[in-house]
Image (cartoon, rainbow, N blue to C red):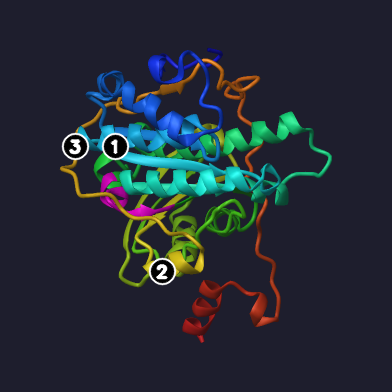
Amino acid sequence: HNSKADIKIHLGRDATNGLGAGADPTVGEAAANESRDEIREALEGADMVFVTIGAGGGTGSGAGYVVAEVARELGILVVGVATRPFSFEGEKRRVNADWAISHLGREVDTLITIPNDRLLQTIDRRTPLLETFKIADDVLRQGVQGISELITEHGLINLDFADVKAIMSNAGSALMGIGRASGDDRAVQAAQQAIESPLIEVSIDGAKGVLFNVTGGYEMSMAEIQEAAEIITSAVSPNANIIFGATLKPEMEDELVITVIATGFDSDTFRQQEVSLTVGDDTKPAETEVDEEMVKNIDLELDKEESAESFAAEPETNIWENPTVEADDDEDDTPAFLRRRKKNKE
């Protein structure tokens, strides 16, 4: 009840008898199925829907894929964003999370998975627990906002819903990264951050669909866009479908922001990354014309399955900024796509 969402749906009044899901995905699933008509009514008219879950519990794990299933039945482009629980949360939540992500992956067009364990690599060990969960929540915010702003914000080289749909429709697992940098070599640094974030579960290597956008101030040059593009494209399949955009924001001044979405990975890559997801059945895509209201904000809740505090208030420090690549003569320490690029120049 603390959610700031414009539309809230009380799931499964009969299935739960007014109680929570008790960390049981089957209860969350039953509750969502009971409320399918309400979910359908809330989603009708949308062109794109984000289904975001914290996998491992009961409501998100069980209800998430049902919401995605209803959206796909309506011909909506569906993007799933899921976080895996921390290892210390125990085996039961891990099993629940695997079940939830597997089922969600079958129903969405594309799925971005973020392991909470990797947050521990990016924060100070003295960070308070509440702050840690705020950061985890902000990871989801950045993923959803990064994709939606590609559509809703007009750019100099503009990206629209048709571009996003071309890359994300029936695409399976996805990588979504944001890089920020300023000063010398800002384009290279931002591009490397975007594709090498420690929070991403899959590698960009071999991606067959790539959409990236470069945002900067009036001083941003075409040469910088080219530098960023070379970093990104050298890491993906030579036959990849690559779509790029550029947006000018005078308030950015010296900062450059790069957003990357990569899809279409080989099944072998999935196995190497321990991802086993099945793409859902083909569904007729929605019309490509869309306005800024196309992304609907739906909050699905049970009476007692509510976090202690809403973490949506203020954006946190950008957690995609940390990774950088340092020069090293040892070839084993150099990312594969940079080694390939170096050999091509030789």
Q: Which residue is mark 1?
A: 69
Label annotation for residue 60: none
- What residue is rendered at 51% in x and 64% in y? 273
Q: Earlier in the sequence, mark 3 or mark 1?
A: 1
Tell me if I can see residue 8 in this picture.
Answer: no
Circle 2: residue type: Gly
Is the residue marked by circle 3 packed among few (<14), some (14-19), or many (20+) residues within 10 Å? some
For this view, does 283 lie left or right of residue 274?
left
Q: In what element is the residue under mark 2?
A: loop
- Magenta region: 165-174
- What residue is rendered at 66% in x and 59% in y? 324
Q: Earlier in the sequence, mark 2 or mark 3?
A: 2
Q: Is residue 98 magenta?
A: no
How far across and down, in percent of the image, does residue 339 sit?
A: 55, 78
Q: Nearer the viewer, residue 166 or 343?
A: 166
- What residue is rendered at 38% in x and 46% in y? 103
The vertical placement of 129 against 108, above or below, is above
Cα separation between marks 1 and 2 = 28 Å
How far across and down, in percent of the image, does residue 130 sit?
A: 73, 29
Q: Is residue 172 magenta?
A: yes
Label annotation for residue 206: 2
Q: Which residue is mark 3?
A: 286
Circle 1: residue type: Glu
Nearer mark to the viewer, of 1 and 2: 1
Cα separation between marks 2 and 3 = 28 Å
